[in-house]
Amino acid sequence: MDAPSLHRRPGATRRLAATLVACWLIVSLLAPSLVQASFLSFDLKDERELGEKFNIMIRSRMPLIEDTEINDYVTGLLDRLTRTMPPQPFPFTVGIINNNAVNAFAGPAGYVFVFTGLILQMEHESEVAGVLAHELAHVSQRHIAKRVGEMKLLSIGQLVGVLAGVVLGSATGNQDLGSLVAVGSQAATAHAYLKYSRDDEREADQVGMNYLVAAGYPPGGLVEAFETMKRMRWMQGGGVIPTYLSTHPGLEERMGYLKDRVKMLPKDVQDRRNNDAAFKRAQMLVRARYTDAKNAVAYFRKLGDKMTCLDKLGLAIALSRSLEDVGQARAAFDEAVACAPNDPLVLRETGRYYLKVRDFARAKSLLEAALRQNPTDIDANFEYGRMLAQEGKPAQAVAYLEKVRQRVPENAEIRSIYGQILGQSGDLFHAYLQLTYAAVYDNNPPQVKFQLGKAKAAAKTDADRRELAKLEETIKKRSEFWKKRIME
């Protein structure tokens, strides 16, 4: 088993359909206690509440990954696009869902989610940016917000489940998943009503193209993304392709008018080149760490003499996941370091591998080199802190894990390891506090109750009690999604 890394690992028996059933059961229980949304009452406050609950549902039930290289890359891409938009009422936040759907979606109140399938299947950053620009245009034109505002007789709680059904069904191309969330005649009607119309899609295409061009990308990115999705739909018969590419028969028309718009742009804009350096790094990590290990090994080996230093690292990561014989992985990591001795990503991943095989001297040297190159790399801080704890230096490790906690606050594994290290350092209150948060983000009510009791018993100061109050507020918000929890 790989050493812990900054991504959520769902249990082996969890299935996505069960996840969505759980989502619906949860929000249906919330409905009676929540304010009903209507055209007259649905305002920015309501949208913020809907967005927060929607965000909690997705994050607590979908497999998110939290790797510095991937998340910082996508966040930077999103920031580049949103700077071109008119002022929005909410800040944008991004999450990366480990799923092979070739899409992204923007929920209410600025919560944006990108599927790893989009990163993996596109050829250029401008194509990923094009899809994101399209989704952001739905936000700026307030397509979902307007439709939600016109809904009657549904509570905010019910809308969370209905909206989750719409976006997950549309984004993954699997309407069966969406229908599992929206159950009942009223919810089914709302589910159909909330879908984007043909006019919505046309407007999102046009406005999204504006954002893409204004952000400095090659203007053909959105068209090329559509063409890739169309090709995949033909090869796969649908599947993970966004529903709007199959439910709207005017796909050729859409690509046609976007191509016409590109032709009308100044020649220097038309001639923009792709700059894919950061994109290729994120894509390599997605392939090497989050797809089937044997398939990833085969992909990188097939490159042969065309392998770059980055590809060599990808092969090493995939080998470390797929082989019991550590010799091949070790040789591959060493070759990657020899190829790119100053690349912080290569140093970090190789250090992580040597920590896994318990070669602490080599791991320490590599992780320290990675941190010298990139002190803000959260994964490197995480691995180095764990290594210090294993060396019997928990007090030193705490400083590194605290940096990680601040950057990745909702990762159960990080909170758990941090709590254990705090316990080793003698800080029992904060140890139990972190272990309680770990149970909260792991959706484990019995452990929440047990660890919270320990934390309360260990609290000694007013500052401790203030921290407990914040924890209990988090528990209150999350516990709404624990009712009728039906899966492990």
Image (cartoon, helix red, strand yellow):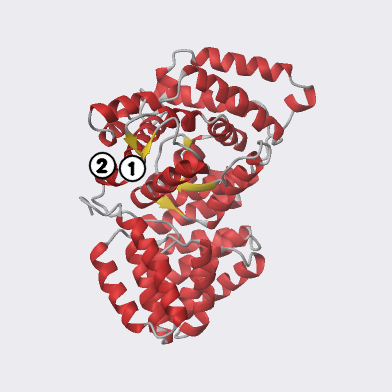
Q: In the rendered structure, which amino acid carries the disc numbered 1?
A: Gly
Residue found 42% across the figure and 47% down from its top: 55
Q: Dividing the image into 4 quarters, which one contains the N terminus?
A: bottom left
Query: Cβ–Cβ below 8 Å for labels 1 and 2?
Result: yes
Residue found 44% across the figure and 73% down from its top: 467
Residue 28 position within the rendered picture, expressed as x and y whole percent measured from the top left: 26, 42
Q: In the rendered structure, which amino acid carries the disc numbered 2?
A: Ser
Residue 271 position within the rendered picture, expressed as x and y whole percent measured from the top left: 75, 27
Q: Residue 281 carries which label?
A: none
Viewer-proximal residue among 201 and 122: 201
**Residue at which label 2 appears:** 28
Viewer-proximal residue among 290 and 294: 290
The secondary structure type at the circle numbered 2 is helix
Earlier in the chain: of badge 1 and badge 2, it is: 2
The secondary structure type at the circle numbered 1 is helix
**Residue at which label 1 appears:** 157
